[in-house]
Image (tube, helix red, strand yellow):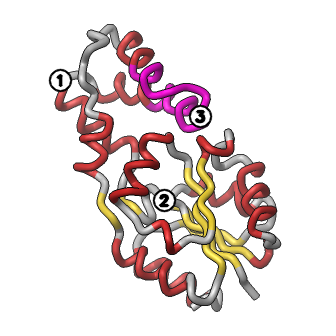
């Protein structure tokens, strides 16, 4: 019935999201969380689409926050400290990879992906990895799912997509992909068993 299982990275394979980073850096710099969240997350979209580089992103954020442009926002340090590999899910992907094609679709900046790739997950468990910065498109746009399906030579009805954000799952479901909103490992296993994947 299924031949392709697609996973999200942040919040599924790696326990990390930008709210964690903003909470960390706002506390570190003594700045209001809400204001920093608004500025950092809004500007992050261009970084994740590969339409700006980290230096420009940092400069724009600090300018909007009226902070010294030399301020260390600990972009890499915070990620390496805060992001944790979900070893149970990674092991599950490794098992699934023996029976199905597996892929990754992630909204992520080039820098974050490079660190995750080197330190936070095993890229070999995926046949293909689709990044927002590499494709110039982000979830939940139908375009990114269609692009992945074309590259993987798979049909939506034979594909399962797993993401921790409901809006991203709805985006996949809008083109006929079978979606699972990830909450935790046990729930994921139960849902995959119910669908006949495991």
Question: Helix, strand, or loop for circle 2?
Answer: loop
The residue tagged 3 is: 50
**Quadrant where the C terminus is found in the figure:** bottom right
* Gap in angstroms between the C-alphas marked 3 and 1: 29 Å
If you read the primary sequence from the N terminus, does the residue marked by circle 3 or circle 1 appear first? 1
Question: Helix, strand, or loop for circle 1?
Answer: loop
User: Residue 102's x, y, as percent?
Assistant: 61, 74
Mark 2 or mark 1, whichever is nearer to me: 2
User: Residue 153's x, y, as percent?
Assistant: 80, 70
The residue at 50%/27% (across/down) is 53
Magenta segment range? 41-58
160 sits left or right of 143 in the view: left
The residue tagged 1 is: 30
**Quadrant where the N terminus is found in the figure:** bottom right
150 sits left or right of 2 in the view: right
User: Residue 111's x, y, as percent?
Assistant: 43, 40
């Amino acid at each position: 019935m299924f031949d392709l299982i697609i996973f999200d990275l942040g919040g599924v394979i790696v326990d990390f999201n930008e709210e964690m980073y903003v909470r960390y850096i706002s506390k570190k710099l003594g700045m209001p969380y809400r204001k920093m969240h608004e500025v950092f997350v809004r500007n992050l979209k261009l970084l994740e689409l590969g339409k700006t580089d980290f230096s420009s992103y940092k400069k724009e954020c600090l300018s909007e926050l009226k902070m010294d442009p030399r301020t260390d926002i600990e972009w890499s340090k915070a990620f390496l400290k805060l992001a944790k590999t979900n070893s149970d899910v990674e092991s599950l992907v490794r098992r699934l990879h023996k029976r199905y094609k597996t892929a990754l679709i992630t909204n992520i900046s080039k820098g974050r992906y490079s660190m995750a790739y080197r330190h936070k997950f095993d890229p070999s468990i995926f046949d293909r990895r689709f990044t927002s910065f590499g494709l110039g498109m982000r979830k939940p746009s139908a375009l990114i799912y269609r692009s992945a399906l074309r590259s993987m030579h798979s049909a939506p009805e034979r594909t399962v997509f797993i993401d921790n954000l409901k809006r991203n799952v709805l985006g996949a479901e809008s083109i006929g992909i079978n979606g699972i909103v990830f909450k935790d490992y046990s729930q994921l296993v139960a849902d995959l068993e119910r669908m006949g994947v495991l």
